[in-house]
């Protein structure tokens, strides 16, 4: 197996004139949970979108399992921030999770029994099988995140990109999602999560990339997630160390 | 076929043809865009009429719809380029085009027999005037067959692209990450909307056509919990609204499409009030009996 799930080379991106990302070099080893950590507006979501070809970089690009995205698209899954969609959309939970199976669907083909079964299994894995028939507008924040996670699982990729999966959720959903992440890691899958709760980074992730428009530090949590690096990423002056980390 | 039956059929078919793509317009919050298209196609229609001298000509409809699409794509491009933001391109480009169209009409360019009133609200009875015959038997207004064609086209597109259209409307970023050609799908869809609006123009006019596209779907959105249900409800509301509006206009001796639009608007308002009250009622019930949290 390829030891590198994904890497970017000198990736830069701008929405307008000012670059949001400058020369990002990122290496994600296979079989780890990698956290992308940085302050609000650091470009974390932008980095993921640029890597997945949802935004066109000014320069550089990403490759997955040593190949361009188009060649291995089925192996790469994306879980956007759940706040980016309209939850008043007329759909049940199972309908949304089934969307994860659409990548293999040809023209005129409807999702059928096999696709629905995959979606149901994914709902089991995220611990919400009883919500299958629920209207999505009636879900809590944590349930929404779990529905999005289930949709990504239904796609069954090798490499997952999750944008803030732990944002705005209850303790039970947090445990359920964490359980899924660790199970994926045991299965040799790779997970990249955008995360901004510094207190839990060390518990959730094996590797970390500190990002603030450029890569401040990257590596295993022990190597990269140091006080000095965090301070640099969050632009905290040296003198102000008061209770910043726990 | 009697003139009355033919005209009623035309009203129903036009309403349903407009309302079907309206489902996805509403789900993508693109009502503003339909308004924009309905304004943009007017100069296309006037110029097209200069060449074809037939308002129902498929060539004219195709040309005007293409003009509408070009403007939509142009405004999207302007939006993406960051030169102007948000709805500004639509606010800038479309009213200007509409004015050009109105000026052309009032200048009687190409002897277009459109009065400004018909441009705004259309005239169904006038549209139904040309009768088609098959083997000497009248088979209803020829315009009915134009709208039937549009309806079939919309149905075919929605049926063929249903899963793609659904995921793209709900979560376009996710759809793109699956490798779905979202931009291509959007372009085809916008072209169909443009085509539908252009074709319905003759019967409904620039302003009311927006109501025909948006209102049945917006009403169904308030009621439906699944997309297929929303589609079915939309068709039902559009057809029912067309019949009731036709009757209303007949009784009040008013313009038919205006009657249809008024009726649709009434439906929407009542549904909105109904769902609001229902929601408040349910919330109160929920407070009395708390739901288990998870
Ligand atoms: N669609 C957009 N158009 C213009 N600027 C944007 C857009 N999305 C994000 N930005 C800007 O890019 C920067 C990085 O945003 P983002 O990647 O969302 O940050 P993060 O996810 O780390 O909080 C921010 O300054 C934000 O304001
Ligand atoms: Mg973000």
Image (cartoon, rainbow, N blue to C red):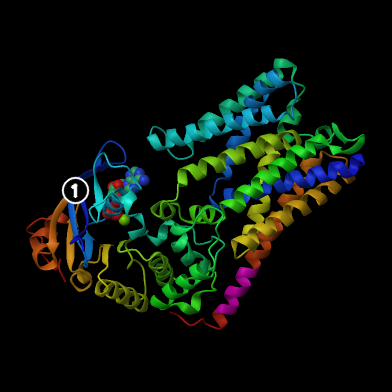
Specify the subunit that label 1 lies on: A
What segment is highlighted magenta in the picture? B278-286
- The residue depicted at 68 percent of the width and 55 percent of the height is B234
- The residue depicted at 8 percent of the width and 64 percent of the height is A223
A96 up-or-down from B197: above or below: below
Q: Is the magenta stretch mostly helix, strand or loop?
A: helix
State the image coordinates of residue A34 (x, y, percent, origin top left): 22, 64
Check the picture and name the quadrant holding the N terminus of chain B.
top right
B196 horizontally vs B3: left or right = left
The secondary structure type at the circle numbered 1 is: strand
Q: Mark 1 points at which residue?
A: A24
Check the picture and name the quadrant holding the C terminus of chain B.
bottom left
The residue closer to the viewer here, B73 or B262, is B73
The residue closer to the viewer here, B199 or A16, is B199
- The residue depicted at 55 percent of the width and 58 percent of the height is A109
A11 up-or-down from B284: above or below: above
Is the C-beta of the residue carrying label 1 under 8 Å from the nearest atom of ligand 1? no
């Amino acid at each position: 197996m390829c030891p590198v799930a994904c890497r970017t080379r000198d990736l830069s991106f701008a929405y307008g004139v000012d670059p949001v990302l400058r020369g990002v070099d990122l290496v994600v080893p296979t079989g780890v949970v990698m956290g992308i950590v940085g302050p609000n507006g650091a470009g974390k979501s932008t980095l993921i979108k640029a890597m997945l070809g949802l935004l066109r970089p000014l320069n550089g690009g990403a490759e997955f399992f040593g190949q361009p995205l188009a060649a291995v698209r089925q192996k790469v899954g994306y879980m956007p921030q759940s706040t980016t969609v309209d939850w008043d959309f007329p759909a049940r939970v199972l309908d949304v999770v089934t969307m994860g199976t659409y990548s293999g669907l040809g023209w005129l083909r409807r999702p059928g029994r096999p696709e629905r079964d995959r979606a149901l299994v994914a709902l089991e894995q995220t611990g919400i099988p009883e919500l299958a028939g629920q209207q999505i507008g009636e879900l809590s924040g944590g349930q929404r995140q779990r529905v999005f996670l289930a949709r990504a699982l239904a796609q069954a990729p090798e490499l997952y990109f999750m944008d803030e999966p732990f944002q705005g959720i209850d303790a039970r959903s947090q445990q359920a999602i964490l359980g899924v992440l660790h199970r994926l890691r045991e299965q040799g899958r790779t997970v990249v999560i955008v995360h901004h709760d510094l207190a839990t980074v060390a518990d959730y992730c094996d590797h970390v990339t500190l990002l603030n428009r450029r890569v401040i530090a990257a590596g295993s949590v022990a190597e990269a997630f140091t006080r000095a690096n965090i301070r640099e990423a969050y632009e905290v002056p040296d003198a102000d160390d008061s209770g910043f980390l726990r | 076929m009697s003139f009355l039956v033919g005209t009623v059929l035309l009203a129903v078919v036009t309403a349903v043809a407009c309302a079907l793509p309206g489902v996805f317009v509403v789900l993508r919050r693109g009502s503003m865009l339909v308004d924009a298209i309905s304004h943009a196609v007017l100069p296309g229609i006037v110029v097209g009429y200069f060449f074809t001298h037939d308002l129902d000509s498929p060539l004219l409809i195709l040309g005007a719809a293409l003009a509408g699409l070009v403007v939509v794509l142009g405004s999207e491009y302007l939006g993406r380029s960051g030169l102007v933001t948000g709805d500004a391109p639509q606010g800038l480009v479309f009213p200007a085009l509409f004015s050009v169209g109105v000026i052309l009409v009032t200048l009687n360019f190409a002897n277009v027999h459109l009065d400004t009133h018909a441009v705004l609200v259309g005239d169904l009875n006038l549209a139904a005037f040309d009768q088609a015959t098959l083997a000497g038997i009248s088979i209803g207004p020829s315009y009915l067959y134009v709208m039937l064609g549009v309806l079939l086209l919309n149905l075919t597109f929605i049926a063929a692209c249903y899963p793609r259209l659904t995921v793209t409307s709900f979560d376009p970023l996710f759809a793109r990450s699956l490798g779905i050609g979202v931009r291509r799908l959007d372009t085809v869809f916008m072209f169909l909307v443009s085509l539908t609006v252009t074709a319905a123009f003759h019967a409904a006019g620039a302003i009311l056509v927006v109501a025909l596209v948006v209102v049945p779907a917006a009403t169904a959105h308030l009621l439906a919990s699944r997309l297929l249900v929303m589609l079915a409800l939309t068709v039902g509301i559009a057809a029912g609204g067309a019949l009731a509006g036709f009757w209303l206009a007949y009784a009040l001796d008013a313009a038919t499409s205006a009657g249809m639009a008024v009726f649709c608007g009434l439906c929407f308002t009542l549904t909105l009030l109904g769902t609001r009250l229902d929601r408040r009622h349910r919330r109160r019930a929920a407070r009395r009996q708390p739901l288990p949290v998870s």
